């Protein structure tokens, strides 16, 4: 992070010919396990990664804020007077404007500022550059005003910005972990109670390897709503409010009820994924605490198979990545992470072998698919930070 901060500072100095007064750094995230469980009121298990969105800022002599993104190589103007409305067309500044607007409505009134945004979280790479940008904006507002949000309020305010201003109906995971992540911890998040539980994950012998398949399949757009509907229907057939409330045994007992429905087989398998994935997610948190790495690995492979066969959200390239990982020395477990149909895998690996593992997987993946993957190893990182105020996010 130090290098990114230094680079951002010097870009700020060059552009505005003055030193920044406020600097914030907010990480992206990876979900270790618990896919599509969020909208079933279940559990997710993310951790913050060592990739950050950094914002450097200083007061500005104007009514609005002037914000430049190094990643987008573009400047935008952000309204600070509370008059912003959701955009017709979403652009990158919509994420920032949404957070500022919600913060103003919550009684935070930042003075005018100019800022530079510089992110090492790949944009649109499934590692939540969007939430890290939102939370970085909210954190900058804290730095400027000297007021602090309640951390849950802060995450929800950012989520609302993504819903309203970026028109993306996301869950709560990304904003929670970016805002409240802790170095050396993963977060078991109950999407029903919205209570995060920090789980120590600080064994230096174990690293998390994120590999981007660099494929993102064009979909019809109905995959996500279809699955939501199938999950809702399965809950109905089971007679529970949400799939979170059902057990595998209950599901098996009512299989005949599912069989009577035209899409019963699909709904049954969707439900089986959600129910077992929820169990795996809670189990994984417990196994990490006890450093039972082998069991953690097994849970990750099982999660992948469940996403592949029951929830049907993987794709050939991602399946290949997981299969290569499975046969690579030093890999403990591997699975797809994120919404599906491409994107990244997440693997638990022995730290000492991480570099070699990356090389081996990369080479084999390229041979089999013709595609060059990108990868990096990380340990659980710190959430939102105001530099010089290390208490935030802890
Ligand atoms: P992800 O969150 O997986 O990276 P999203 O599509 O949800 O992908 O969010 C990515 C979008 O967020 C970008 O297309 C851009 O509009 C905005 N964004 C994120 N980080 C930055 C940044 N550093 N500069 C400008 N825009 C950014
Ligand atoms: Mg996003």
Image (cartoon, rainbow, N blue to C red):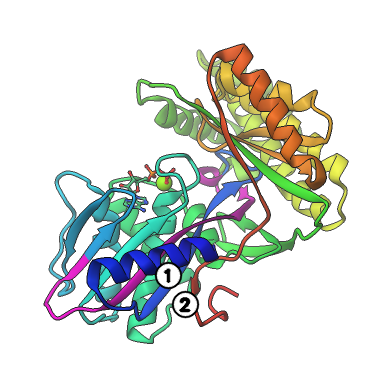
**Which residue, given by chain and number where applicable, does mark 1 sit on?**
154
Quick check: 81 left or right of 268? left
Q: Which residues are magenta?
A: 38-66
Quick check: 204 left or right of 381? right
Judge whether residue 47 is colored magenta.
Answer: yes
Residue at 53% from the left image edge and 34% from the top image edge: 236
Q: Is residue 100 above or below residue 201?
A: below
Magenta segment main secondary structure: strand
> Which numbered circle lies on residue 150?
2
Judge whether residue 227 is colored magenta.
Answer: no
Question: Of helix, strand and loop, which one carries label 1?
Answer: helix
Residue at 62% from the left image edge and 61% from the top image edge: 381
x then y, percent, for residue 185:
69, 62
For the C terminus, give its image quadrant: bottom right
Q: Is residue 112 above or below residue 259?
A: below
- Tell me if label 2 and label 1 are in contact, CB under 8 Å: yes
Quarter location, residue 105? bottom left
> Would you say residue 165 is visible in this rendering?
no
Q: CA distance from mark 2 to mark 1?
A: 6 Å
Residue in front for this viewpoint, 275 or 378: 378
Residue at 39% from the left image edge and 64% from the top image edge: 8
Quarter location, residue 133? bottom left
Residue at 56% from the left image edge and 28% from the top image edge: 373
């Amino acid at each position: 992070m130090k290098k990114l901060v230094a680079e951002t500072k010097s870009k700020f100095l060059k552009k505005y010919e003055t030193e920044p007064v406020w600097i914030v750094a907010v990480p992206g995230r990876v979900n270790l396990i618990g896919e599509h469980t969020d909208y079933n009121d279940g559990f997710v298990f993310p951790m913050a990664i060592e990739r950050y969105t950094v914002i450097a800022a200083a007061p500005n002599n104007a009514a609005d804020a002037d914000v430049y993104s190094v990643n987008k190589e573009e400047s935008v103007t952000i309204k600070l007077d509370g008059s912003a409305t959701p955009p017709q067309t979403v652009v990158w500044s919509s994420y920032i404007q949404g957070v500022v607007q919600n913060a103003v409505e919550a009684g935070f009134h930042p003075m005018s500022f100019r800022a530079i945004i510089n992110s090492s979280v790949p944009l649109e790479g499934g590692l939540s550059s969007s939430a890290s940008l939102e939370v970085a904006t909210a954190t900058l507002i804290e730095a400027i005003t000297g007021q602090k949000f309640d951390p849950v309020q802060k995450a929800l305010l950012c989520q609302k910005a993504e819903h309203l201003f970026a028109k993306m109906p996301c869950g709560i995971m990304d904003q929670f972990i970016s805002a409240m992540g802790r170095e050396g911890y993963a977060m078991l998040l109950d999407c029903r109670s919205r209570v995060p539980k920090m789980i120590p994950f600080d064994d230096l012998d174990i690293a998390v390897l994120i590999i981007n398949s660099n494929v993102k399949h064009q979909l019809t757009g109905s995959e996500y709503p279809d699955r939501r509907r199938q999950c809702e229907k399965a809950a109905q057939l089971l007679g529970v409010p949400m799939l979170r409330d059902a057990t595998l045994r209950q599901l098996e007992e009512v299989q005949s009820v599912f069989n009577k429905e035209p899409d019963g087989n699909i709904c049954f398998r969707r439900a089986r994924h959600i129910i077992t994935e929820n169990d795996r997610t809670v189990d994984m948190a417990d196994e990490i605490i006890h450093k039972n790495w082998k069991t953690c690995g097994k849970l990750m492979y099982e999660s992948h198979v469940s996403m592949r066969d029951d929830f049907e959200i993987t794709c050939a390239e991602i399946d290949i990545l997981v299969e290569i990982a499975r046969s690579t020395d030093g890999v403990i477990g591997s699975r797809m992470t994120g919404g599906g149909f491409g994107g990244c895998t997440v693997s638990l690996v022995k730290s000492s072998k991480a570099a070699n593992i990356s090389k081996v997987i990369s080479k084999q993946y390229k041979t089999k698919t013709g595609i060059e993957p990108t990868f990096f190893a990380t340990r659980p990182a710190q959430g939102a930070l105001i530099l010089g105020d290390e208490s935030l996010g802890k």
